[in-house]
Each structure stands twice: as structure tokens, then as C-alpha cells.
Amino acid sequence: MPTLAYAREHLAGWGRFPVEPCHLYRPEKSTDFLAILQSTQEPSYIPRGLGRSYGDAALNLDAGAVCSVRLNRFLSFDHATGILECESGASLAEILDTFLPRGFFLPVTPGTKFVTLGGAIAADVHGKNHHRDGTIANFIRDFRLLTPAGEVVTCSPAEDRDIFWATVGGMGLTGVILSARIELRRVESAYLFVDYERTRNLQETLERMAASDENYQYSVAWIDCLARGDSLGRSVLMRANHAAAADLPAQVREPLSVPKRRRLKMPFDLPAVALNSHSVGAFNHFYYALHRTAAHQLVDTDTFFYPLDSIQSWNRLYGKRGFVQYQVVFPAETTEEGLAVVLKRLVQSRRASFLAVLKRFGEANRGLLSFPIKGHTLSLDLPMARDLPAFLQRLDDVVATCRGRVYLAKDAVSKPETFAATYPNLEPFRAIKQRLDPQGLFSSSLARRLRIC
Amino acid sequence: MGQERILASVLILGATSGIARAIAVEFARQKYDLVLAGRDGRELDATAADLAIRFAIHTRVCIFDVLDCETHAAVLSSRLSESVDDLAGAVLAIGYLGDEHLAENDFAEARRILDTNLTGCVSVLNLLARHFESRGKGFICALSSVAGDRGRQSNYHYGAAKAGLSVYLQGLRNQLYHRGVQVTTVKPGFVDTGMTFGRPGLFLVASPEYVARRVLKAIRGRRDVVYVPWFWRCIMWAIRNIPEWLFKRLRL
């Protein structure tokens, strides 16, 4: 059997830490996936999309990484139901480009549209509307999974539901998602009405969220995690609803057209000294001052949902050393206490993060390794430093004590014991994984680091 | 909303390859309907569905095997008769790089390289030429390769076939000029597709999307021979002009 072509490349997640040599395969036909698995050229494989997970979820040291981006075709679309069937390499950006002009938006979207549908399912992504709509799993009618045994199984919450709920949030470890059907959301315009509200501290932020989140489809807080003392946890709350066509001002000629913004590109890596507690602190201060309380602001979908996507390669702001994005969730009962500890430690350590987001979560779903649980999630970026892993592992302990957990799509440094303690459905996941993949054909650097399999 | 529909279609042969898909996208963007021809029905169906959904055009699929020359006339005649006066032109994007080392030792591989890249293409191009000639209009665009500009030790079977194809197209261009049919030869350098993925020694690799945009521009501009990207014209001019006594010593 002829050797299948692969490129030996140094791959990394979006945080550019860690960087690992992998054997990258790039199938161009749907039958290529099976051929790659059956070739037994590699000890194991991990499916990979656009590489937007931050850590090592889509890395497989010295083994196979199978990139799906060329298998990105739309297979069918039902205008009446809004159900789109497409190959798993199709990106959310492509879906929006085609369907927003036709009056359809994504039912759930993460903070970047440059993720593949397969990746979105594997990470069970959530968005600013989790408190109402849950994760993307709620809008996936079914998907076709190529199992490690080489079979194609159609999984849904009704059919083969154990495999469905193992694969949703399963970080690619149960097989390759070949295609999926997603139910898009009907919208009348590419705009939202946003209410901005400045809060003085963490307690006020949590109170305001609890009080009126239910009035909004989307709700998120940008949190100044360098503010100290009485201002600890001061935030800018941003909450929005889709704008009906009739409510748009007259100057908006094309309601379903997103104004084109020029995409800037970060052409080089900033030197390590550029982002430090002073520069970031200054930015935070400025950002907080700039955002006054303001109601009913008209904002287009790109600006509201994907502010960072307008800077291509924004991860280079963190320089060559890269960064770790740390995202955790605290259950409702321990949120205030847990968040306060995390924020205080960040402030004390003077670690700079200027992209800190706080969001209230709704109910958890049945995804065995799915991240969201009812409570609040905090996510922040921290520039990589030698003592960062230890610092974050100590934070992990706090999170574990509070019965929270870390998001696998972002994680790069967690310890297997903490992970096992915070994901109570790990054993059921391992059982399904063992059944589907007794030979361990699907593995990743993350899976080995956390001893998932 | 959007562009007006151009009521014409384009036939794309070898439609499952990366370059051909990108070319199909560009034509679809310009609102041409498409006939996608190739061997893999499932792949063609998926591509056809995708283009129809994305660009709101009509697409049809046609099973076509370049190596099965006996079937070419029948396959084409059924397709061409369906789209009488509709077919604006045809793009031939069939290529098989093959394994040079294997070809040197196993004639079956050598034959496959020659038949896929040259013989089979001649068979279908003859048929297309007669069709467009009888209508007095249309375009034929075929993807050759810079590899055909000079034989070198690392891929001369492929190079020979592509060289043959380039000369055939040259003759066809000459013959059809007075019949109102345009023949464009596109010579890409390295393109980032499954054909080259993971191979060492590549440089100046172009994306299939870039090549596709250039192909459309060449067809629109009624160009004869186009190198993609443009600098390959200079590179190949230099390579062609290296005297043989020197070139034979090189290890390119």
C-alpha cells in the first residue's frame, strides 16, 4: 500500500504553547479519512480543524493530526427548517458568509468564527447566549462519525445517543466527525441592540447579571482583572438582542449585510516586554473609562460577536513565547467566593490579562466531557512565563475545591488529578471510548497529558 | 439582489481535484452553471451540492474516466446535447503526477502517467474541439504544467506527457483560431494540493484559489499561454535556456 502523504510540521494551538512536531495529513476527499486510519502509518490520530483551540487539544506529538479544512462542503439546506448539512471542515465563518445574507445566523457561536463545525462540536462550544440556549449541541440534529473501527455511525440525541454525548465535547477522541446537521437561527438583520452597563465591582456585576439576563438573548461582561480593592471585578456588561428589521434606523439600507471592516493583520510577534502589567493595566483603565453606560446601541454581528477576528493573527500580540488562555467555571453556589480568590491572586501576582470575560451559564447538558455547568465562567489570557503553569495549577486547586472545572478547549497546563476530580463523567466517557477505540487509535497530546486514555 | 445570472454553463473535467474545485468556485461566483465531470460520483455530488447552495447556480454531475477513452464520445455527447448552445466553454484539469521512480521500472505506471496526462486528454479534447468548432464559439482551457517546459530527472515521465499536451494545445489553438474558438494553456508551478502535500523540495507554492482566479482571468482575457504565478515564465525561460551540456549535469 503506497504511503499516504503527510507533512512533518510543528503545530500549536492558538496560544502557541505548546508547540509540537506532528505528522499532518490533509485529506481532500471524504474517503481519504478512512484510508488514513487504515494505513496504520501512525500510532494514533487526532482530527484537527482550524487549530483555534488554545492548548494541545489538536496536537499529537510525533503522531498523526488529520486536518479537515478541505472537506468543507455544504451538502444540503432546508430553507423552511433552517437545517444545514455540511462536512465537518466547514467553518462557522463560511456558514455565516453564505447564510446571514439569507436571514440565518448561528444558533450558538464562540468568540471567533474561524472554527470548523467539527471542532465546534468536539469542544461543545458555548456563546454569549448560553444562559438561554445552552451549547451548540442543542442545535445539532445529528452528525456522521467515522469510528476508530472504520464504521460510519449517524449519532443524535435519539440514535446512538451514548456516542453522541461522548463525542459532543469529546475533543476528537471518539472518531472523526465527517458531517453534521445544524439548525440555523432565523434573524431579520445583521444587527443587534446592545445595552452597555458599567459596574463598580464583582458583586454588582453578578447581581446585575442575575437580575436582568433573562431580558437578553446575549449577555457577557468584560472584566478588569487588574482592578484591586473595592474595584475588584469591576466590569462592563454588554447585553444584546437581535434587531428586527423594522427597528433599524433608516440609514441601514441592507439589513442583512454586515459592513465590511478592513481586516488588520498582526505581521510580526511583539517582543516579550510589550505586554506587561503596566501596559495592560493602562489599556484596562482606558477601556473601562471609554465604555460608559449606554442603552440600545446598534452594533453589527461581526463587531459584537467577533471583535478579535478583525485582527488576523492577534495571538502574535503575545509574542513568540505564546500565552495560555485560562477558562474556568464556578457553580452558582461558589461563584462569588471562587471568582474573588482568582481575581485577588491575579492582582497580587501582577499577571497581565486584558481579555477577561465573565459570563453566566445556564444548565449543563449531557455531554460527558462538556464544560459548561450552571454558574459563571471566567476566561482570561495570560502571557506564558516559566512560573505560569505552577500558578495556574494552584488556581486549578481553588477551582476544584469550589467544584468548578477548566475548559479543555483552552487548557494547556492542567494536571490529570485535578481534571479527574472535576469531571465526574470521566469514567463513563472512558468506558465508551474503550468500546469504540480499544486500540487507542485516536489520541492527542491533551488526552495523554490528562490521562483521559 | 446580487449579480444577474449569466445563462451559460461551463464543463469542468477532473472536477474532484483541488485546483478544479477552486476553478469551479470561481465560475460559480460569476454565476455560471456547472457540469462537473470526474470518476468519483460521491465526491462530485458533494461538490455540486455545495456550489449550488453557496452560489445559487445549477450544477450537474457526469461520471467521466479519462483513461476509458472508448466511453468519451458517449459521455460527452449526452452532456453536450443537454446543454445545446449553453456551454460557454470547457476546462480540463486532469493530472496525475505519478511516481517517477516506479515509472522508470514498471511500464504500467509509465503508461498510466502518459495516458492520464496526455492520451486520455487528447481523446476528450478532440471531441470538445469538434463541438465548439461546429458552433463557432467557446473556449477550451487546459491545465498543463511548467514540468513540460523541460525534462528533468526527477519527473520526466510526467514532464513528457505535459509537454505533449502543451504542444497539442498549441496546434489546436492554431487550428481553432479561425473558427472562433479560444484555446488557453495554463502552466502552474507548484500548487498546494494533495498532489504536492508533504513533498520535500517545494518552493513558491501557490494556493488553488489563487490559481483559479488566474485561470478565470486568463480565459476572460483570451490569453494563449499563461504561467501561474507569473514569475514561472521567467524561471522556465531561464531553465529552458540552460545549454544541454550543462543541464544534463544538474540534479534538479
Image: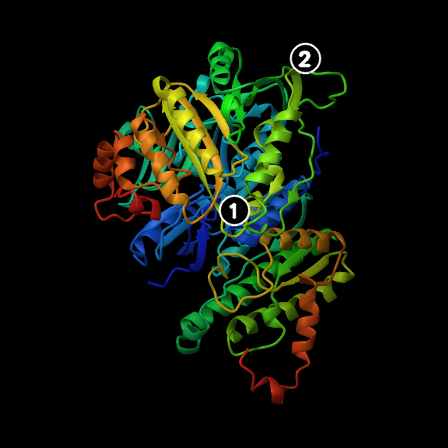
- Subunit under mark 1: B
Q: What residue type is labelled 2?
A: Asp
Element type at mark 2: helix
Q: Where in the figure is residue B186, as x and y percent of width and height?
A: 66, 61
- Labels 1, 2: front one: 2
Q: In which quarter of the image is the C terminus of chain B?
A: bottom right
Q: Which amino acid does label 1 sit on?
A: Cys
- Subunit under mark 2: A
Q: Where in the figure is residue B205, as x and y percent of width and height?
A: 58, 61
Q: Where in the figure is residue B57, as x and y percent of width and height?
A: 62, 36
Residue at 23% of width from left, 36% of height from top?
A432
Q: Where in the figure is residue B189, as x and y percent of width and height?
A: 61, 64
Identify residue for label 1.
B62
Q: Are marks 1 and 2 in contact (CB under 8 Å)?
A: no
Instruction: Name which quarter of the figure residue A306 lies in.
Output: top right
**Is A243 located above or below residue A85 in the figure?**
above
Along the viewing direction, whichever of A251 and A420 lies nearer the viewer = A420
Instruction: Name which quarter of the figure residue B129 lies in.
Output: bottom right
Identify residue for label 2.
A247
Any part of residue A137 in sight: no
Along the viewing direction, whichever of A356 and A432 lies nearer the viewer = A356
**Is A399 located above or below residue A333 in the figure?**
below
Residue at 53% of width from left, 75% of height from top?
B156
Marks 1 and 2, how far apart in space?
A: 48 Å
Along the viewing direction, whichever of A211 and A10 lies nearer the viewer = A211
Q: Do labels 1 and 2 share a chain?
A: no
Element type at mark 1: strand
Instruction: Name which quarter of the figure residue B52 lies in.
Output: top right
Q: Tell me: A281 left or right of A339.
A: right
Q: Tell me: A257 left or right of B48.
A: right
Residue at 26% of width from left, 43% of height from top?
A451
